Amino acid sequence: MKRLQLLLPGPVSLHPEAELAQALPMINHRGPEFRELFKRVVAKLQKVFGSEDVAVLTASGTGAVEAMLVNFVAPKEKILIIQTGTFSDRMAKTASAIGAEVELLEPPEGEGASPEDVDEALKRSGAKVLGVVANETSTGVVQDLPELAKVAHERDALILVDAVSYLGGHDMDMEAMDLDAVASATQKALMAPPGISFVAWRERAEEKMKALPKRSVYWDLESYKKFYEEKFETPATPAVSVLFALDRSLEIILNYGLANWIRRHKAFADAMNFLVESAGGSVYPKEGWRSNTIVVPLLPEGVTPAQAKALAREKWGIDVGGGAWKLKEKSIRIGTMGWYGEDAVYRALSFLAELYGGDVEEAFQKYKSSL
Ligand SMILES: Cc1ncc(COP(=O)(O)O)c(C=O)c1O
């Protein structure tokens, strides 16, 4: 099989050590080797999230978001969700499916929500839960989490965050940002294979969870906490091979330095945005609302996403994502997550220059000087 450099909105290319870790011999998930592995992984996740309570679920990101909602939103309760694309739509669908009453707030085109608009919507709706997709993978729009947390708490609401494509690519410190619960997954900026996801939470959310009726067995976060505290295990059989790889990936990221890791995503995203815009093209998110992990260029007239993706694969050896949500037919999405070297950055910039024109050398120097 030809090895393609993945520059997708996820999954991502892995570091070779993480790839190999998946082939380690299977271990008993109720035995001492597993407990050691799991302790190591959870300790690293606690650092990455900035929270003590992290449940490790065998599910993709959608499962973690569902687990977060089913534990922290009461049946029939109102939840205000900021609608910026496919994944906020999915959060809304999930909230409805678990019996919540959903109110949507749509920010202006290409922007996240302003604290003033969120405050007004919380006041109007009376919702005591705010649902936010921190980094909307379908449109490349990021939200200002600390500001939103402040507004939510002033209105006595919890803030629940989908950080599936945000964690590892943007600053995250749940305590400093005062976030109540955050869901994320392995296969994006944490550079691990798909199959595991997480929910981390803090005191306010825990208090609410304890007061709510249990509506799920598999997603009962209290059971994950209890199993961890009492045995360093998970309630059901976890995806052990994914955990082997995640252990390596997190080690590599923490050794690289979390701040450096985040900077690397931003440097790559900034260089691509610069190249497109300096050549007269445009990207969807407005300045100030741009993702570090997903770049969303609007395609030049006459170029389809399928043509652009084929050019990237066949000529430049990079696999990029197609458009999504209402940008499906007019954009592509290039991820800056996972394992890649300078050559992949250069190829991505060259690919964009073939579509838009622009100075590859200048954009590449910009990348290198921002690392
Ligand atoms: C922001 C966001 N939320 C949720 C999901 C769903 O995650 P998964 O595909 O792992 O279920 C994704 C996947 O791309 C995502 O980017």
Image (tube, grey):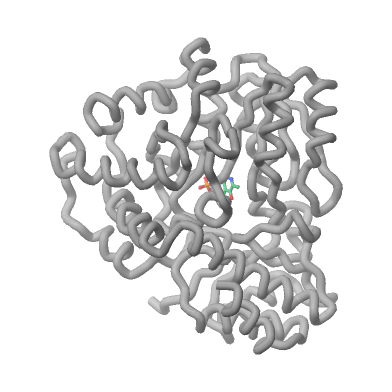
The number of discs equals 0
Direction from residue 99 to residue 337 in the image, left or right: left
Residue toward you, 157 or 198: 157
Q: Residue furthest left?
A: 32
Quadrant containing the C terminus is: bottom right
Picture residue at 58% right of the left edge, 60% below the top: 9
Q: Is residue 236 above or below residue 187?
A: above
Find residue 264 and report its image quarter. Answer: bottom right
Residue 229 x/y as whole percent: 28, 26
Find residue 198 and report its image quarter. Answer: top left
Residue 206 x/y as whole percent: 48, 21
Direction from residue 288 to residue 351 in the image, left or right: left
Q: Is residue 326 above or below residue 46?
A: below
Find residue 145 and report its image quarter. Answer: top right
Direction from residue 352 to residue 189 in the image, left or right: left
Picture residue at 75% right of the left edge, 72% below the top: 304
Picture residue at 82% right of the left edge, 75% below the top: 281
